[in-house]
Image (tube, coloured by chain):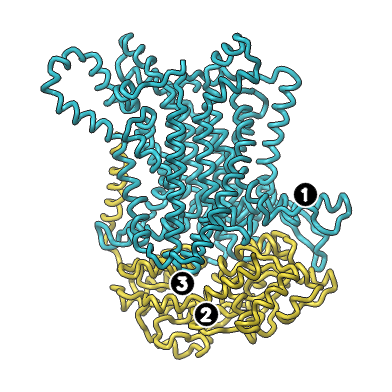
Amino acid sequence: MKRLLIPTFLLVCFLLSACGPKGPATLTVMTHDSFAVSADVVTAFEQTNNVKVTFIKSGDAGAALNKAILSKDAPLADIFYGVDNTFLSRALEAGIYEPYASPLLANIPAEFKLDPQNRALPVDYGDVCINYDKAYFTDHSLAVPQSLEELTRPEYKGLLVVENPATSSPGLAFLLATVKHFGADGYLDYWRALRANGVVIVDGWKTAYYTNFSASSGHGPQPMAISYASSPAAEVVYAETPLTESPTASILGPDTCFRQIEFVGILNGTKNRALAEKFVDFMLGVTFQEDMPLQMFMFPVNPEARLPEAFIQYAPAAEQPAALSPDLIAANRDQWIADWTEAVLR
Amino acid sequence: MRRRFSDSASRRVNDSTSQRVNESTIRRVSESANQRSAESLNRRFVLAESLIRRIAPWLGVSIFLGLFFFYPLTRILALSLDFSALTADNFTLTFYVLRFTFFQAFLSTLLTLLIGLPAAYLFARFDFRGKSLLRLLTAIPFMLPTVVVAAGFNALLGPRGWVNLGLMRLFGLESPPIVFVYTLWAILLAHVFYNTTIVIRVVGTALAHLDPRLEQAARLLGADARRAFWRVTLPLLRPPILAASLLVFLFDFTSFGVILLLGGPRFATLEVEIYVQAIQIFNLPLAAVLSFIQLLCTLAFSILYSRLVTRLAVTVAPRPAETNLRRARNWREKLCVGGMALLLLALFLLPMASLPLRSVAHLESARGERTAVSYGLTGDYYAELFVNRLGSLFYVPPFEALANSLIYAAVTVVLSLALGFPVASALARPGRLEHLLDPFLMLPLGASAVTLGLGFIITFNKPLITDHWSLITSPLLVPLAHTIIALPFVIRSLQPALASIPDRLRQAAASLGASPRRVWFTVDWPIVARATLAAAIFAFTVSLGEFGATSLVYRPEYPTLPIAIYRFLSQPGGLNYGQAMAMATILMGVCATGIFLIEHLRLPGAGEF
């Protein structure tokens, strides 16, 4: 009896899924944990195109991409969204995408279009910046540092928490900002100075923000943490009591922020090419682009999309973010991380 | 008294669980005379039948683990392994990581036993007020997601935790006196916090059912209490202690979240390094080598364990737990019982208490006054759980997340018991097949979730049956993954109870005319009923709290409670943090209720075992 239980269970599951009524076509979108969208925006797309959109989330950005690469011979989905400029080359080299020159690309500024063959199309960007606790700096009559160099001054000793670039995407972005600013032969000296000045390294964003950052609900010990330029807006949107001012702000000096750009693409071998093109257009279109900031706390790449009020007031984007070409990042990322680990952690 | 059952005797009466098999065994005994006359004719048939009988209990588990564990694992390892990973640099890295993995796992296991064994003794031998509550408390950490536990430890012992703030205020200190987070101590304490319940359950159950007359006999013969304990009780407890140590050690050996969140980036176990290599660096060959080493180590420990345990196994008729229970008699015992209970209370209550507290308390500081924080009570976080503020497609109402978690847990319990019971009963009367297969059952504990997740992707991504249905996109994969993890626990909790049933009890019942069915219900069932419940609790808690594998295989429309907690904690904002704490509190509540209900389930015919 007992041994019959599992086959019966499996059989029921198979039958249940097989006997469903033949509905509209399905389009499958593979993405990472942080993807979010309003329900009515997706429903509108489904109704206009008579399609059912299914999302597969496969762990963090790195895990999701690796899964897309490993399953490229029998792709699980028609679309993959969520590869950023620090991992873009890995996706392109693996050949997971089919090119698609969407008409909507015409509107999008050239700085975001990193793949000339249009296999990966930009959707959104976010600046990884140092967030600071406004109250702490007022309390201690301390000036907010305005450049990477100032962070090594004694008055900021032990006040900064940074994520490990080997395990965290914002951590990697901040490491890349220092590589851009100090050059490949200078960044390690800078990090040694930061280490001497008591920089705190943690595994990932959750710990940095909620455990170590003093302005978050975790009330940690460090008043500066690596987060996003949009985080101050999220603090207002998700405040416990309505706020007129964010408790945090970003340091927006030259090269203190690193710009992450996220891409979407049609997976090689899709059987739904026409629908997949429509979905890519939809992601680049104004409706999705205006919905996305408050859902994912990223900035739209489409300049026609209006930013929500909270972003305009509390989340200015960096004016001179650090940037490195994806090829340069791909060629050196692992070595930079290894050298960084040797210099800062050992 | 310490007679071990000879192999032939045990082979004759193996498979105590399956009634059908039992029936035929008894019939075989009663009709042995007829059989002997027809032996030459039936010899072939009997041989085939006994072969089938030996293999049958393994069928379910072999198919299940073969399909959902060994096959995907082999495929991903075969795809990734190549000689490019065998460089000097990688060798050094592997050496350092392996050394630390062993080092922390040994220390953690030792500390867990140091706390767990006296605790098991306390629960098995003494009756005191609040006992069942304390017992419940020790079981909850096991299913808490690491991110929640890390938050709890930080609220207690972090640089801004209660202890440090209190000490700073008391002695007027400038900086926090206790450095806890990102030290080895944080890793060790968290492991003790997580795994003590394994020792309490596995060793405590065995201790509670030991025949007290053995110890009494030793005392009558002149041994003092200490000597009786060391020479009689402890030797009898060696198998359960070994079983618990193995489970604890394997859990610590493959530790991931605790190392990352409480140990910090300076520490890396094999599991952490596999994640970094496979996901961040995409160095699959090195990740495969590391996964392979981790699997080999797990296998080696399991083989060592099964060798030791067969050498030490003793069958003694188990007694109802009540016969061993008493209240503390003199002041020394009272002091010991009280002290131990207080220690456990502090270890388990303090780190967990901050979560429910934070879920109903909001901290507010006036602008520019970080030091003056005002506290207030609020139900806002719970209320907010029901609001889809931004109309998100992936919003899930708390009761739905709860229902998903409970459904997955129920399927896991049923599936792992159905698969584990036949195997555990075969293992209780081990033959050559059992000795061979036993260590492989522990392998799921040694496989990294990342490797297995990638294995699933390349194995189950093809459509099955219909064009749109593949296993990888079905919600079924979640309870399947949970069952893989829960199975070793289920088997290890059932096996000792099944092994403890002396055959002479069954034979006596049978010779007094009881039908095989009646024998099973009056002899076997009362003894294994409680162990079945303990196994069910393990499966239930493993499923409720599992995050690592779940996050790689779940469907976004059916998130579990731990997934919901992670979702809240991945965006900034006071409400998100508060909701995460509220969800964590709900998870703790559900788990406690579940354990309470399972423990108090009155199984028909079950004795107080």
Residue at the spot of label 1 = B163
Q: CA distance from mark 3 to mark 1?
A: 48 Å
Are discs 3 and 1 located on one and the same chain? no
As drawn, the chain in yellow is A
Chain letter belonging to callout 1: B
Chain letter belonging to callout 2: A
Q: Secondary structure at mark 2?
A: helix
Residue at the spot of label 2 = A329
Camera-nearest label, 3 or 2: 2
Q: Residue furthest left?
A: B41
Q: Secondary structure at mark 3?
A: helix
- Above or below, comparing residue B273 to residue A97 in the picture: above
Q: CA distance from mark 3 to mark 2?
A: 35 Å
Residue A242 lies, in percent from the top left, at 70, 66
Determine the colour of chain B. cyan
Residue drawn 69% across the image and 27% down it: B337
Residue at the spot of label 3 = A41
**Which quadrant of the view contains residue B519?**
top left
Q: CA distance from mark 1 to mark 2?
A: 44 Å
